[in-house]
Amino acid sequence: MTRRVSVWGGGFWLSGKTREAALDAARELDDLGYARLWTSGGFGEGVPPVYSEVLNATTRLGVASGIVSMWHAEPADAAATVARFEQDHPGRFLLGVGTSHAPVVDAKAAHTYTKPYSHMVEYLDALDAAEPPVPAERRVLAALGPRMLELSAVRAAGAHPYFVPAEHTAQAREILGDGPMLAPEVAVVLESDESTARGIAREYMRGYLSLPNYSNNLRRLGYSEEDVSGGGTDKLMDALIPWGDLNRVVAGIEKHYGAGADEVAIQVLTTDQSAFPAAEYRRLAAALIE
Protein backbone atom coordinates (compact mmCIF):
# COMPACT_ATOMS: atom_id res chain seq x y z
CA MET A 1 0.00 0.00 0.00
CA THR A 2 1.38 3.39 -0.97
CA ARG A 3 1.91 5.59 2.07
CA ARG A 4 1.36 9.33 1.73
CA VAL A 5 1.94 12.07 4.31
CA SER A 6 -0.22 15.17 3.85
CA VAL A 7 -1.17 18.41 5.58
CA TRP A 8 -4.57 19.63 6.76
CA GLY A 9 -5.08 23.34 7.31
CA GLY A 10 -7.88 25.86 7.74
CA GLY A 11 -8.00 29.61 8.24
CA PHE A 12 -4.33 30.36 7.56
CA TRP A 13 -4.75 29.09 4.02
CA LEU A 14 -8.02 30.92 3.32
CA SER A 15 -7.32 34.39 4.69
CA GLY A 16 -6.24 37.01 2.21
CA LYS A 17 -4.06 38.54 4.93
CA THR A 18 -1.84 35.47 5.04
CA ARG A 19 -1.97 34.50 1.38
CA GLU A 20 1.65 35.27 0.51
CA ALA A 21 2.84 33.45 3.62
CA ALA A 22 0.57 30.55 2.70
CA LEU A 23 2.04 30.28 -0.78
CA ASP A 24 5.55 30.32 0.66
CA ALA A 25 4.47 27.57 3.08
CA ALA A 26 3.00 25.54 0.20
CA ARG A 27 6.27 25.75 -1.70
CA GLU A 28 8.13 24.46 1.35
CA LEU A 29 5.63 21.62 1.85
CA ASP A 30 6.20 20.70 -1.80
CA ASP A 31 9.97 20.69 -1.28
CA LEU A 32 9.66 18.64 1.93
CA GLY A 33 7.79 15.90 0.07
CA TYR A 34 4.29 16.22 1.51
CA ALA A 35 1.78 14.59 -0.81
CA ARG A 36 -1.19 16.91 -0.54
CA LEU A 37 -2.68 19.96 1.14
CA TRP A 38 -6.21 19.49 2.44
CA THR A 39 -7.90 22.79 3.17
CA SER A 40 -11.43 23.85 3.99
CA GLY A 41 -13.60 26.18 1.96
CA GLY A 42 -16.48 25.37 -0.33
CA PHE A 43 -17.65 26.39 -3.76
CA GLY A 44 -21.06 27.77 -2.82
CA GLU A 45 -19.85 31.31 -2.22
CA GLY A 46 -17.19 31.27 -4.91
CA VAL A 47 -14.19 28.98 -5.21
CA PRO A 48 -11.51 30.01 -2.69
CA PRO A 49 -8.56 31.36 -4.68
CA VAL A 50 -6.18 29.39 -2.47
CA TYR A 51 -6.86 26.21 -4.45
CA SER A 52 -5.67 27.57 -7.78
CA GLU A 53 -2.95 29.75 -6.24
CA VAL A 54 -1.37 26.84 -4.37
CA LEU A 55 -1.51 24.68 -7.49
CA ASN A 56 0.11 27.45 -9.50
CA ALA A 57 2.78 28.07 -6.86
CA THR A 58 3.89 24.44 -6.58
CA THR A 59 5.05 21.79 -9.00
CA ARG A 60 4.02 18.49 -7.40
CA LEU A 61 1.91 19.10 -4.29
CA GLY A 62 -1.68 17.93 -4.57
CA VAL A 63 -4.60 20.02 -3.29
CA ALA A 64 -7.87 18.69 -1.90
CA SER A 65 -11.03 20.38 -0.69
CA GLY A 66 -11.61 19.27 2.86
CA ILE A 67 -14.55 19.52 2.73
CA VAL A 68 -17.02 21.03 0.26
CA SER A 69 -20.55 20.86 1.67
CA MET A 70 -23.03 19.22 -0.69
CA TRP A 71 -25.70 21.60 0.66
CA HIS A 72 -23.88 24.75 -0.40
CA ALA A 73 -22.04 23.87 -3.60
CA GLU A 74 -24.02 23.20 -6.74
CA PRO A 75 -22.83 20.01 -8.46
CA ALA A 76 -22.43 21.82 -11.78
CA ASP A 77 -20.18 24.44 -10.17
CA ALA A 78 -18.10 21.78 -8.45
CA ALA A 79 -17.78 19.80 -11.68
CA ALA A 80 -16.71 22.87 -13.67
CA THR A 81 -14.07 23.70 -11.07
CA VAL A 82 -12.67 20.18 -11.04
CA ALA A 83 -12.54 20.16 -14.84
CA ARG A 84 -10.65 23.45 -14.91
CA PHE A 85 -8.11 22.28 -12.35
CA GLU A 86 -7.73 18.95 -14.15
CA GLN A 87 -6.99 20.75 -17.40
CA ASP A 88 -4.46 23.12 -15.83
CA HIS A 89 -2.94 20.72 -13.26
CA PRO A 90 -3.70 17.11 -14.30
CA GLY A 91 -4.16 14.72 -11.40
CA ARG A 92 -3.38 17.25 -8.66
CA PHE A 93 -6.81 18.36 -7.43
CA LEU A 94 -9.13 16.12 -5.42
CA LEU A 95 -12.73 17.09 -4.70
CA GLY A 96 -13.67 16.27 -1.12
CA VAL A 97 -17.43 16.33 -0.54
CA GLY A 98 -19.28 15.95 2.73
CA THR A 99 -22.71 16.17 4.32
CA SER A 100 -21.62 18.86 6.81
CA HIS A 101 -23.57 19.06 10.11
CA ALA A 102 -27.16 19.84 11.01
CA PRO A 103 -26.34 22.89 13.19
CA VAL A 104 -24.24 24.38 10.40
CA VAL A 105 -26.68 23.65 7.57
CA ASP A 106 -29.79 24.70 9.47
CA ALA A 107 -28.13 27.92 10.63
CA LYS A 108 -27.65 29.01 7.03
CA ALA A 109 -31.43 28.59 6.52
CA ALA A 110 -31.04 27.65 2.86
CA HIS A 111 -31.63 23.95 3.52
CA THR A 112 -33.01 21.63 6.15
CA TYR A 113 -30.63 18.88 7.20
CA THR A 114 -32.64 15.78 6.34
CA LYS A 115 -31.72 12.45 4.73
CA PRO A 116 -28.02 13.29 4.27
CA TYR A 117 -27.21 9.87 2.80
CA SER A 118 -29.92 10.14 0.13
CA HIS A 119 -28.82 13.67 -0.69
CA MET A 120 -25.24 12.51 -1.09
CA VAL A 121 -26.32 9.79 -3.53
CA GLU A 122 -28.21 12.42 -5.52
CA TYR A 123 -25.21 14.74 -5.41
CA LEU A 124 -22.91 12.04 -6.77
CA ASP A 125 -25.47 11.27 -9.48
CA ALA A 126 -25.37 14.94 -10.45
CA LEU A 127 -21.56 14.93 -10.56
CA ASP A 128 -21.77 11.91 -12.87
CA ALA A 129 -24.28 13.69 -15.11
CA ALA A 130 -22.39 17.00 -15.28
CA GLU A 131 -20.67 18.07 -18.46
CA PRO A 132 -17.90 17.21 -18.07
CA PRO A 133 -18.52 14.76 -15.20
CA VAL A 134 -16.31 14.42 -12.14
CA PRO A 135 -14.68 10.98 -12.39
CA ALA A 136 -14.95 8.84 -9.28
CA GLU A 137 -11.16 8.83 -8.94
CA ARG A 138 -11.14 12.64 -8.59
CA ARG A 139 -13.51 12.75 -5.59
CA VAL A 140 -13.61 11.47 -2.01
CA LEU A 141 -16.28 11.55 0.68
CA ALA A 142 -16.07 12.83 4.25
CA ALA A 143 -17.32 9.50 5.54
CA LEU A 144 -17.70 8.52 9.19
CA GLY A 145 -20.50 5.96 9.49
CA PRO A 146 -20.64 2.55 7.80
CA ARG A 147 -23.15 3.47 5.05
CA MET A 148 -21.20 6.53 3.94
CA LEU A 149 -17.95 4.58 4.03
CA GLU A 150 -19.53 1.90 1.84
CA LEU A 151 -20.72 4.62 -0.55
CA SER A 152 -17.24 6.15 -0.71
CA ALA A 153 -15.85 2.78 -1.75
CA VAL A 154 -18.17 2.36 -4.73
CA ARG A 155 -18.89 5.94 -5.83
CA ALA A 156 -15.61 7.72 -5.07
CA ALA A 157 -11.88 7.16 -4.76
CA GLY A 158 -12.29 6.61 -1.04
CA ALA A 159 -12.87 8.41 2.25
CA HIS A 160 -11.49 11.35 4.21
CA PRO A 161 -12.68 10.94 7.82
CA TYR A 162 -12.12 13.86 10.18
CA PHE A 163 -11.70 13.89 13.98
CA VAL A 164 -11.27 10.15 14.36
CA PRO A 165 -9.10 7.88 16.50
CA ALA A 166 -7.07 5.01 15.07
CA GLU A 167 -9.78 2.47 15.94
CA HIS A 168 -12.08 4.25 13.49
CA THR A 169 -9.38 4.04 10.83
CA ALA A 170 -9.21 0.28 11.37
CA GLN A 171 -12.99 -0.10 11.06
CA ALA A 172 -13.05 2.17 8.01
CA ARG A 173 -10.40 0.10 6.24
CA GLU A 174 -12.36 -3.07 6.92
CA ILE A 175 -15.48 -1.52 5.38
CA LEU A 176 -13.66 0.03 2.41
CA GLY A 177 -11.66 -3.06 1.57
CA ASP A 178 -8.13 -3.06 0.20
CA GLY A 179 -8.44 -0.75 -2.80
CA PRO A 180 -10.09 2.57 -1.93
CA MET A 181 -8.17 5.49 -0.49
CA LEU A 182 -8.39 6.10 3.25
CA ALA A 183 -7.05 9.49 4.32
CA PRO A 184 -8.00 10.45 7.89
CA GLU A 185 -7.24 13.87 9.30
CA VAL A 186 -5.13 13.63 12.45
CA ALA A 187 -4.59 16.67 14.67
CA VAL A 188 -1.37 16.70 16.71
CA VAL A 189 0.26 18.89 19.35
CA LEU A 190 4.06 18.94 19.38
CA GLU A 191 4.35 20.11 22.96
CA SER A 192 5.87 18.13 25.83
CA ASP A 193 4.39 20.17 28.67
CA GLU A 194 1.21 18.25 29.51
CA SER A 195 -0.80 21.22 30.76
CA THR A 196 -0.01 23.30 27.67
CA ALA A 197 -0.60 20.41 25.27
CA ARG A 198 -3.93 19.47 26.80
CA GLY A 199 -5.05 23.10 26.81
CA ILE A 200 -4.37 23.41 23.07
CA ALA A 201 -6.02 20.07 22.29
CA ARG A 202 -9.08 20.69 24.46
CA GLU A 203 -9.79 24.04 22.82
CA TYR A 204 -9.76 22.29 19.45
CA MET A 205 -11.91 19.39 20.65
CA ARG A 206 -14.60 21.52 22.26
CA GLY A 207 -16.03 22.85 19.01
CA TYR A 208 -16.04 19.53 17.18
CA LEU A 209 -17.64 17.61 20.04
CA SER A 210 -20.60 20.00 19.82
CA LEU A 211 -21.33 18.69 16.31
CA PRO A 212 -23.52 15.56 16.42
CA ASN A 213 -21.92 13.74 13.49
CA TYR A 214 -18.60 13.68 15.32
CA SER A 215 -19.89 12.96 18.81
CA ASN A 216 -22.23 10.23 17.53
CA ASN A 217 -19.37 8.63 15.63
CA LEU A 218 -17.33 8.49 18.82
CA ARG A 219 -20.28 6.98 20.69
CA ARG A 220 -20.44 4.25 18.03
CA LEU A 221 -16.83 3.48 18.85
CA GLY A 222 -17.73 2.99 22.52
CA TYR A 223 -16.88 6.35 24.05
CA SER A 224 -19.18 7.46 26.86
CA GLU A 225 -21.31 10.55 27.32
CA GLU A 226 -18.70 11.84 29.72
CA ASP A 227 -15.98 11.32 27.10
CA VAL A 228 -17.77 13.43 24.48
CA SER A 229 -19.13 16.16 26.77
CA GLY A 230 -17.69 19.66 26.94
CA GLY A 231 -14.09 19.59 25.83
CA GLY A 232 -13.86 15.81 26.20
CA THR A 233 -11.99 13.62 28.66
CA ASP A 234 -8.25 13.07 28.75
CA LYS A 235 -8.94 9.48 27.64
CA LEU A 236 -10.64 10.70 24.47
CA MET A 237 -7.98 13.32 23.88
CA ASP A 238 -5.23 10.73 24.08
CA ALA A 239 -7.07 8.60 21.51
CA LEU A 240 -7.79 11.45 19.11
CA ILE A 241 -4.82 13.79 19.30
CA PRO A 242 -1.22 12.61 19.52
CA TRP A 243 0.65 15.06 21.74
CA GLY A 244 4.07 15.30 23.35
CA ASP A 245 7.56 15.11 21.92
CA LEU A 246 8.28 14.19 18.32
CA ASN A 247 8.63 10.46 18.96
CA ARG A 248 5.32 10.26 20.81
CA VAL A 249 3.47 12.27 18.14
CA VAL A 250 4.95 10.20 15.32
CA ALA A 251 3.92 7.01 17.12
CA GLY A 252 0.36 8.31 17.30
CA ILE A 253 0.31 9.06 13.59
CA GLU A 254 1.83 5.66 12.80
CA LYS A 255 -1.15 4.01 14.54
CA HIS A 256 -3.37 5.25 11.69
CA TYR A 257 -1.04 3.84 9.04
CA GLY A 258 -0.91 0.58 10.96
CA ALA A 259 -4.72 0.56 11.09
CA GLY A 260 -5.00 0.83 7.31
CA ALA A 261 -4.65 4.48 6.28
CA ASP A 262 -2.71 5.04 3.10
CA GLU A 263 -2.67 8.81 3.63
CA VAL A 264 -2.75 10.84 6.84
CA ALA A 265 -3.60 14.55 6.67
CA ILE A 266 -1.73 16.03 9.65
CA GLN A 267 -3.08 19.15 11.32
CA VAL A 268 -0.57 20.71 13.70
CA LEU A 269 -2.30 22.55 16.56
CA THR A 270 -0.57 25.42 18.33
CA THR A 271 -1.52 28.33 20.58
CA ASP A 272 -1.64 30.57 17.47
CA GLN A 273 -3.67 28.99 14.69
CA SER A 274 -3.33 32.12 12.54
CA ALA A 275 0.35 31.36 11.94
CA PHE A 276 1.73 28.41 10.00
CA PRO A 277 3.71 25.99 12.21
CA ALA A 278 6.52 25.53 9.70
CA ALA A 279 9.08 24.21 12.19
CA GLU A 280 6.71 21.47 13.34
CA TYR A 281 5.95 20.35 9.79
CA ARG A 282 9.68 20.23 9.02
CA ARG A 283 10.26 17.95 12.01
CA LEU A 284 7.37 15.71 11.05
CA ALA A 285 8.56 15.50 7.45
CA ALA A 286 12.01 14.38 8.56
CA ALA A 287 10.46 11.67 10.72
CA LEU A 288 7.68 10.41 8.44
CA ILE A 289 8.50 11.04 4.78
CA GLU A 290 10.71 8.41 3.23
Image (spheres, rainbow, N blue to C red):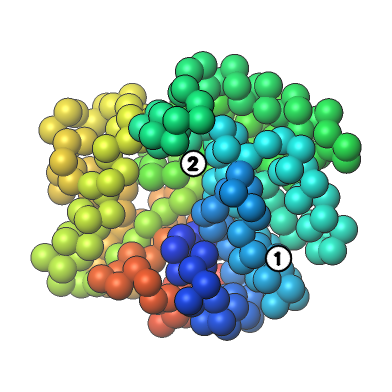
Residue at which label 2 appears: 161
Can you tell which of label 1 and label 2 is closer to the viewer? Answer: 1
Q: Amino acid at mark 1?
A: Ser
Q: Nearer the viewer, residue 73 or 94?
A: 73
Query: How dense is the environment of label 2, judged by Cα within 10 Å: few (below 14), some, or many (20 and up)?
Result: many
Q: Quadrant of residue 247?
A: bottom left
Relative to 184, residue 35 above or below: below
Helix, strand or loop at disc 1?
A: helix
Relative to 158, residue 120 above or below: above
Q: Please name the residue shown 54% across and 76% down the image.
A: 19
Q: Please name the residue shown 58% across and 63% down the image.
A: 37
- Among the two numbered marks 1 and 2 on one chain, the one whose residue lies closer to the N terminus: 1
Residue at which label 1 appears: 52
Q: Please name the residue shown 47% across and 22% down the image.
A: 112
Q: Nearer the viewer, residue 150 or 248?
A: 150
Q: Which disc, if any, is residue 73?
A: none
Q: Amino acid at mark 2?
A: Pro
